[in-house]
Image (cartoon, helix red, strand yellow):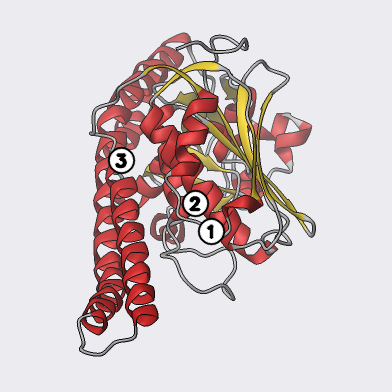
Amino acid sequence: MANTANGIDRTRLLRAVRDGPFDQHAALVSRMLGTEVALVTVIDGEAAAQRFLGLFGVPEPIVEARATPLALSMCQVVARDRAPLLIEDMADLPWTAVHPLRTELGMSAYAGLPLRTPDGTTVGAVCAASMHARSWTPDDVARLEMLRDFVEIDLMPVLAAADARERADEVSLLLSTLRHELSGELTVVLGGIETAQLDNVPAAVHDRVLHNARRETNRVIATLDSLLRTDSRAPMRLREVDVADVTAEALQSIELDDAERVELAVPAVRATTEPTLLASILANLVSNAHKYSDGPVRVRGGWHEDGRFGVSVQDEGGGFPETALGQLFEPFTRGHEDVAGGFGLGLYIVRMLCGRIGADLSLETGERGSTLTVWLPESADSEAATT
C-alpha cells in the first residue's frame, strides 16, 4: 500500500488534515512570496489524492474538502522526485501547458519544495502558486525554504498530538467494547461456578463446568495482560534470549485441547528482544491458527535473505477471505466470521506488540492456509544457545 512505506507518521498527518494545522503557515507563504495561492500538502497514494495540512487562496469546494485528486496536483511531482520544482509559466512547458492545474484552475507559476517528516521521509510539499507568470528569484526560493523549515519543525507537535488523540480514541474503543465482551464471558464463568455449587450435581458435570470456567477465566486474564503490554508507556526489558526457549514457553502458556496438532521446529538462535512480549506475540498467533484450522499448526524458525531471523506460524485453514484482509489487524475483527469465540483481538495485539519490539509482521494467505511470520529486528547468533 502506498502509505505504509512512510510508516505511522503519514497516516497521522492525513488524520490531522481536518484540523488545518498549517493554514497560517500557508497564509504566511502567500504573503512573503506575493502569490495568490499557497499550500502545505501530504500525498495520499492510497486515495490518489493530495490533502492539505495548510491552504490559502483556493476555491471554496477545495477548502471544504481539504483535498483534490492527484490529477490537479503539482506537489506530487515534488514529493515523487524529492526535489524542488520551479515553473515560471506553465504555458511554456508541454507537460504543464495541458495540466489541469492550469487548464481548470488557471494557475500559471508554481514553486514547491519537498516536505519531510522528522525521520527524513518526504510526504508532500510546501508550495506557492500564482495565476500569472512570474520569475522566481533566489530570495523567493530562500524564503520558501525558510518557511518550509518552519513547517517541518512544527510537524513534531502535530504528530505528537495526533498520536495522543489516536491512542485515546483507541483506548476508549477498547474499553467500551471489552466491557461488553468481558461481561458476557464472566457471566458464563459465574454461571459455571454456581452450577458446580448446586447440590447433587454429577461429578462429571461438576468437573466439566469448573474446567470450562477456569479455561475462560485464564483466557480473559491473558487477553487483558496482552492488551496492557501494548501500552507504549510500559517499560521495556530488552535482553539477549534464545528464541527457541521463548517459543517453547509461549506454547506452554496456551491451553489447547489437542496440543499435539502444533508442530514446533525453531532452532536455537540468540536475539535481543523483550521475551515476554515476543512470547505473547507467538502465543496469540498459535492460538489464532489453532482456532481457525483443523489440521496441523507448524511453528518454524528461519532466516530472511536480509539476515533477519523470523518465527512463522502456518496453518491449513483455507486462508483469510479477501474481504477481511483490509481490517485483519484492527481491534475486534475476526478473520473468519463463521468461527465463534474470541474477542477478535488476537491479531490486533500481535500488530501492536510487534511495533513495540521493532519486529516486522508478514502474511501469506491462500486456499491452502495462512502463514504469519514475525521478523525480529536483531539476531545475534545462529549457533546453539547456551544458558
Name the quarter where the C terminus is drawn.
Answer: top left
Foreground of the two, 317 or 176:
317
> SS at mark 3?
helix
Amino acid under disc 1: Gln
Query: Which residue type does callout 3 highlight?
Result: Arg
Crowding near the residue tagged with mark 2, few <14, some 14–19, many ≥20 C-alpha atoms within 10 Å: many
Q: Position of residue 38 (x, y in %)?
A: 42, 36
Cα gap from disc 1 to disc 3, whole angstroms: 21 Å
Residue on which the image places disc 3? 229
* Residue 308 screen position, x and y as percent: 62, 20
The x, y position of residue 200, in whole percent, is: 25, 90
Q: Give, as a three-letter code, the residue at label 2.
A: Leu
Instruction: Please determine whether, in this image, residue 34 is positioned above or below residue 214.
Output: above
| Placement of 175 over or under 193, stated as above or below | above
Q: Is residue 255 above or below residue 334?
A: above
Residue occupying the point 20% across, 89% down:
199
Q: Nearer the viewer, mark 1 or mark 2?
A: 2
- Tell me what residue is drawn at x 42 percent, y 48 percent: 349
Residue position marked by numbered label 2 in the rendering: 347
Which quadrant holds residue 11?
Answer: top left
Q: Nearer the viewer, residue 161 or 211?
A: 211
Query: Which quarter of the figure has residue 155?
Result: top left
Residues at discs 1 and 3 in contact (Cβ within 8 Å): no
* Label 1: which secondary element: helix
Q: Which residue is mark 1?
A: 327
